[in-house]
Structures are given as C-alpha cells and as structure tokens.
Amino acid sequence: MFDTVKTSDLSHVGKNGHREDTIEKLTGEAMYVSDMLLPGMLHAQLKKSPHARAKIVKIDYSKAAALPGVRAIVTGDELDYRLGLYVVDKRILARGEVRHFGEAVVAVAADTAEQARAAVDAIEVEYEVLPPVLHHMDALKDDAPLVHPELGSYDYMAAAFTPKPGTNIANHTKLRKGDVDKAFAESEWIIEREYSCPSVQHVPMETHVAIVQWGKGDKVNIWSSAQSPFTVRNLFCHAFGLSHSQVRVQVPYVGGGFGGKAGIGIEPLCAVLSRKAGGRPVKFQASREEEFSLLPCRSALTYRIKTGVSATGKIVAQHMTMYWDSGAYADYAVNVTRASGFSASGPYEIPNAWLDAYTIYTNKPYGTAYRGFGHVEFHWAVERHMELVAQAIGMDPFVFRLKNALRPGSLTMTGEEITEHTGNVIKCLEEAAKAICYGNLTDEEKARQKKTGWKIGKGVAALQKAPAMPPFTATSVVLKMNEDGSVLVNLALTDYGQGTYTSVRQIVAERLGFPLEKIKVAFESDTDRDPYDWQTVASKGLLLSGNAAILAAEDLIKNAYAVAGEILHCNVCDLGHDGDKIFIKHHPKKSVSFASMAVGHALPNGNGVGGPLIGVGRYIAQGLSNLNKEDGQGNPAIDWTYGAHGIIVEVCEETGEFHVLKIASVYDVGRAIHPEIVRGQAIGGMLQGLGTAICEGYIYDQQGRLLNPSFTDNKIPTAKDLPLEIECFVVETPQVDGPYGARGVGEHSMISVAPALGNAIQKATGAEIMHMPMRFEDVWRALRHKDPIDNWITKSPIGSCRSAPEARPNG
Amino acid sequence: MKIKVTVNGQLYERDVLEHKTLLRFLREDLGLTGTKEGCGMGECGACTVFFNGKVMNSCMILAVEADGATIDTIEGESRGPSLTDIQKAMEKNNSVQCGFCTPGMVMSIKELLQNKAKPSIPEIKEAIEGNFCRCTGYVQIIEAVLDVTGRSKEKGELKHV
Ligand code: FES
Ligand code: FES
C-alpha cells in the first residue's frame, strides 16, 4: 500500500524518529516480568532429569512437602494434559518417562525461591535409565529406540504435517518439481555433498519468565515474557479445556526473544502450581542453565544436496534431503522443516527439484523457532554448496550465483512466479560484492597479507526468506482517539526490541497526517485489551500490522469526517484535515478540532453528536495457499526478502585463527521505514549470525547430557568479536502489498553470514569447511583435511568443558 | 545479618541473609529493579553497578560484603527529569533494543568515560566487552560513545543503493 509514493514526499516514513520505549529502558524504569512481584506470590523451582532417557520408577516428595514455606508440589502423574503447536506431544511435566536431559519432572512452589530450591533438593526420583537416541541420523535406523512410541495416537495439524508412527519421524515434508531423473541424466556435472550444524541456543538476555495466577473461579491471569500472547492463550486454553474468555495473557517489556519465546513455554507449569496452591500467583524464571536445557533451542541439521549442472553452468536438477533434529518434542521444529523445505534451494532457480525434509525425534532438548526459522542453518549448506559446485565446474562462484539467481519470470520450487516487485537478489549480490571489492585484493590488502603472513580471502553469500505462517494469517490494529486529539494504538504484536512499534507509529502518523508526538503505541500487550494478532514471528509483523495500521488510520479518519460533516453541515468529500482539525477545503476557516470530537462532540446547544473516535484495521494475508502434501506445490510466501553478505577475512594457516576484516550486508527491504532501526536489525542479526558461524553450539556427552549450558562454555559474541568494518545497504524494490512498500527484515540479517565466512576462508586458504561453527580448530583441521570435531556428541567430554555435569553441584 | 549501605546517595540499613547477592538485595529488598540478572554467574554484565566507585558484577558480590559500601545503580543516573549525556546519546543513536543489557551497559560506559575523555574504538570495545548484548550487535552503542565524546562523524549509516 502506498508503495509508489517517494520517501522524499513522506513526513514520517523513511525518517529516523524517536523510539518511544527507549527512555524507560535507559533509566531502568521499564518493567519486565522478571522485575514483577505480586502480593502473595510464590516462587517455583523444578526438579529436572539428569538423564536423556529413563523410566520414572518412583517419585518421593514426602520430605520436601514437610519443609517450611512449601505450598504446592506437582508431578506429571497428576497432569493429564498434552501441549503442542503442531504435534501435540509434550507433557507439562514428564510422565512415565523422561525424554531429554534437563526435562522438568517435579515442580515446587514455595514462599521464597530458597525454600523452593531446598524442597527440590529433598525430592527423590528413582529412574530406570534407558539407552538414549542422540544423533538424529542414528534415530532413523531400524533398531533405534522410539522417543515417542505413541506417536500414532497424538493429535497433529494434518493439513501441513505428516508424522510417521512407529518411527522417530515427527514430520516428512516433500517437494517434487519437474523431472529430476531426466535432468540429472542430461547434466554435464553432478556434485553431491553434505553439510551440518549443531543445536544452538537463542540466548535472550532475559531468560524465560512467567507469573500465573489461577483463581478459584477458574479465571487465569498470565504475565509472561512471551512473544505471542494470543498463541499462549490459545494453546493454554486447548490444553486445559478452558474458554478463551477465562484466560488473560499480558506481556510487558521482554528482554529479547529471537523465536525462543514464540510459542507456549513455562506458563502451564506456573498455572498448575498456582491452582494447587489455592490461587496464589506463582512465578518461575529459568536460570541461565535452564534456558539451555529445559527450554527449547535451535534444531541441528544435516543437509545432503546433489546438484546437476548443464555445460553452461545452469543448475538443471537438485536432489535435497534435510534431516532436522527435533530433540524430544516437535514444537516449532516440524514447521521449520516445512518452511525450510519450500525455501531449501536458497534464492536460485531449480527447474527440477526433489526434496525430502524430515523432522526427527531424539533424546535431546527440543528444537523450536530461532531467528531465520531454519534458513540460517540450511543457507549454510546451500551457500557453501554453491561455492563448491562452482569450484568443481571451474566457474567463479559469484558468476555461478548470478547465473542461477531468481529473477522476474523464474519459478520458485513451489511454482510461484517471481515478478519485478518480488525483490532483487541479483542487485543485493552485486552490491555486496562491490562493497568488498570481490574477486581480487586491493594493494593495501596485498601489503597487509605480506606483512602479517595471514592469507586474505573474500566470499559472498545470498539469502532469502519468506514468513512461514498459515496462509490465512491475520492481525488487527485499533486506534483510539484521546480527549486531546492524540491517538493510542493498540495491537497484540509484541515489540521485544525489534522496533516494530516505532515503525507502526510512523505509519499511523503518516497516514493520519499527524505529528509523531500525537501517536502512542501502548507498550504492554494484553489479550483482554488488544485486538487479535497471530504471533510475533516470521518477520511478518511490519507487513501485516503495518497494513492493519494503515487501514485503522483510514477508518479513524473516515469516522472523524462523518462527524465533522455533520457538525460543519457539509459533504464529507469537501473536507480536509491537518494534525489538529478537520476543515472545509473551500473555506478552511470553517473547521472543527479533533479534540472536540474525540470522545463525542457537543453542539452549541448542548446536543451531542458522534461519540468516541475509534479506527479499526484488519489485515489478512492474501493469495496464499496450503502446499500440496505430495509435491509441495502452492503459494506459501506473502513476501520474499532477499539479501546478500560479502565478507573479507584474514586467516593464519599455521593456527587456523582468523579475523573478519569487513562485512557488507545488503537487503531488499522494499522501503526502510526507519533506517536506523533497519541498521540495528542488520547489525544485531549479523553478529548473532557470526556467533553461530564461529563459536556457538550445544555439546553433549555420550549419555546425552548437555556439557555447555553456560556462557563459560557456550560463548556468544562480545563487542570485541565485531568485524573491523561493517557496512549496511538497502535496496528498495517496493513490495506492492507492503505498508509503504516495506517488507520484513528482522530475521534475514542472521542468514548466510556463516557461509559467506566459510566461502571467504576457503578463498583465502582452500580449507573446505562443511560443518558449522567454524572455530579456529575447525579451520586448522580443515586445512589439514582432518574431520571436523563432531559437535553433537563429543567423544572426549571430560575436561573439555568446565561445566560438565560432574563438575556442577545441582546438575 | 545487619548491613548499612549507601545506594544512590541514600543510606539503607537492612537485615540480609548471608547468601543473598548484592544484585538480589538491590532488586528484591530495595526494589531497584533497573539492575538486571542475565546469568547470575558473573558472565554477562547485566547486573553491573558501581561498587565504591568501580563497576562490578553485583551478582558476584554478597550483600553482606556491601556493608559500609557505596553503591550506584542505574536508578541513580538521570536524577531529575532529564537523561544523562550518555543516556541521551544512546537514545539518539538507536543503541537500545530489548533494553535488558542497557542499564549495565550505561554503567560500564560511565566508568569508561570517567577514566578516559575520548576513548578509541578498541578501548570502547574493551570497556563493554563484559556486557553481553544479544540484540544490537554493539555498533550503535559504540556510536553513542563516539557521539557523546564529540565524534559523531565516525558514525556509520544505512546506505541506500
Ligand atoms: S547477572 Fe551478573 S554477570 Fe550476568
Ligand atoms: S538490547 Fe537486548 S540485550 Fe542489549
């Protein structure tokens, strides 16, 4: 909407306006759930499984129950509920069997956290340890233990997913396009390789936290650090058989999410404790260690790609098999599989494609959405593969990419036609390459290389992502005019730092023609106050809520004009307005102020007209369809955001150490609504992508115990890990149905950082790295053709990690 | 155990449990929730406060160790209606996303600027290295420091191509 208006003709959109939430955060006034205390509130602690797979033989909490301050103890046996977004496979507390290390087994609520901790320590659980299935490739073997023997009896969303009862496969997504066998037979080259990456933790700085009060009249109040209040409410009501009107979810400031807080988490746990404690509110905040092992992570992936290329360097066929490690529960992982399936080739045209993507249960902490929704992981594979295929056929990898990139007229793997409005990946690639002087070293770089002895290399990688969401995803925005003519915006999309509220505010101000200061977006989200939004995920917020905001603004103006026409005795079509008033265009002095109409207008004789001014905007995704389950064809993407990174790296061949000298990132955002926020997303995501690329990942021992659930052993990037130079660019190919032409970019910055780095390292040294992360030792090994260390299950656990379970007291 | 501690210029006398950290004392006993807990293990810097004039991770200090000490927290910044120069620069430079690291970050930057009027970029990175931020990628925080020390020209920007 309004995609053709030039930014220079706009007042607010495209400018770097003030962010409304910043001052509270800078002063410490902003209230997060972790800061909240309620009268009579109890504190919860959990007894967790020390085993990856075991039968629960006996739980004895008699000693714990007798301890001071203990108000409620709950075990899985008394909770006959199952939860699940897509496959309903998870208990609130383990029942009968534990399926991963760190899974919650018993929950305690006490007056203080110390008392709850003491009670947890006094609980005795007897287990019969069973052999776990840890690696997702092992889980596919015929004799593998089944993580969910009852898979066949679970409910699941049949329109989108296909679980395979009797196996560990939680979902099988298929895509079939063209005639792959024929195309392979005609290919000049066929190259097949396999790539992988481990599970990774989101690391929001605020760990998951919730307070729940289950009142005696079965009214439930939830305060949660959740991304999607309506999804929490919906899943909660389904699990407990409550009406939606009985449950209220409020989300105040949230200290980061990145997908890890997208679904439902610890809320049901607090709820059952509160119910058992007679309705007292119960708070649970995950410790940092629990954030790693109790709460979900990003799925590991093994991705095998076989590509057929013609004599001219065009990809003619691709056979793709993705093996996603779901961990113990399906959660979002099945949908990551589905969304990755339809996007699996990256932004390239594949005329003949065959894809099988499996979500595989293992006895490990479970996988969920994480910024990029699978695209970070599989782009690692795709963009390393493009590099290696180009090398194999003797073509420059950049030229090979351009040759195969999607362009107007191309068909995606699901058969969607790309148009000139879709976005321009070729331009993104070209600009990224230009920014790093791709292809050769500058004199300065040559001199540096000579001086340091470290080899300099340059690499590029492209990316694409569309929101993964049901085809009928909808949202709404309500504008309410205050007595002074200012406007309050209510929406249930949450803003945990992305800045979407600021952009929505700009859009509302723009469309109303009001100054920015007159618009306030209500910060906390509340299912009892705000109109519906599906979820805050998928980089869909700006597009859907931005459109709803435009429609709400138009509705508000329309309603105000109707009242003004009555007051001014004129036709609505003759009216105009500014930020304060509505006037007759021909007689601008004849006007009525918004303030005087905001809550109902009093005529001179005291008669009332109008009423409180409210604008409602609803938007639902257009033109999308379910994908055919047999061939994956259909229209899943409301918009595609394309991008590319260029990286310059220097590598010490002797030690495998490297520095990122420069990263240049380019995204086709349609329109940058707030350039500094776009840049903040670009850089923040880039560094998170670099963390994934260079150091982050879960390490387990052979019993399936997580060895590195702490910042000591699972580093995340600090300020010192920044590349020396960072440049961010935007291309603006307007999205026809985006608000002012904009499309989302929140996740994209994290995608393809890793392969751009891998490609640059390969260019510098020849090291062929196929496994992420690329730690210095992995580069060193690759240079010496040694296998990378297996990141999933380490073979030499003891001593390699300071937080090995043996070394920790309350493991 | 009874302790006397001066926080943001005000003297408090409180009874505290021996094992309570200074962080939890500030948050739970004094209601100063601006200081955050990101790990409780001395790794992330979300709990950074001034302890007798030097920044420290308050999760690694016991409240009883603060007996007689002077503590400054984020709530002590910007007393009165206006923000400090550091806060203003962070506001202007889009240095805040989720905001959970922000109070600790403000304290570390304050100490840096007390010690050095115009720190170099590597010195800024060094000073905030112990403050994890998962959202911003640090660049716009570093730019706020450049800005507040009169070097806003060194700031990057989003380029339209
Ligand atoms: S909470 Fe103190 S360093 Fe993380
Ligand atoms: S702004 Fe979110 S952690 Fe720094």
Image (cartoon, rainbow, N blue to C red):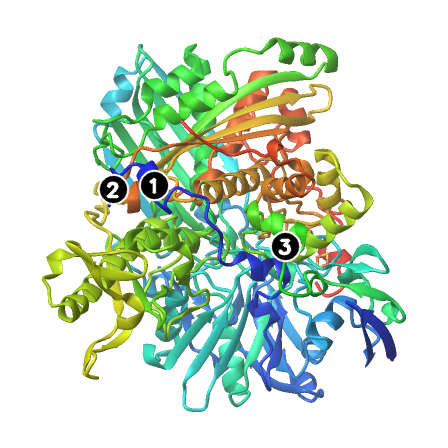
On-image quarter of the C terminus of chain A: bottom right
Tag 3 near tag 1, CB within 8 Å? no
Residue at position x 74%, y 51% in the image: B110
Q: Amino acid at mark 2?
A: Gly
Query: Can you tell which mark lies on residue B102?
Result: 3
What secondary structure is found at the residue carrying circle 1?
A: helix
The numbered mark 1 sits on a residue in which chain? A
Q: CA distance from mark 3 to mark 1?
A: 38 Å
Write down the residue under mark 1.
A341
> Where's residue A643, x and y in %?
41, 32
Residue B23, picture quadrant:
bottom right
Disc 3 CB within 8 Å of nearest ligand 2 atom: yes
Amino acid at dot 1: Gly
Query: Which residue in the protein does label 2 denote?
Result: A632
Query: Percent x, y for residue A504?
Result: 37, 54
Q: Amino acid at mark 3?
A: Thr
Which quadrant of the render holds ligand 1? bottom right
Query: Which quarter of the rendering shows the N terminus of chain A?
Result: top left
Q: Of A191 and B103, which appears nearest the observer?
A: B103
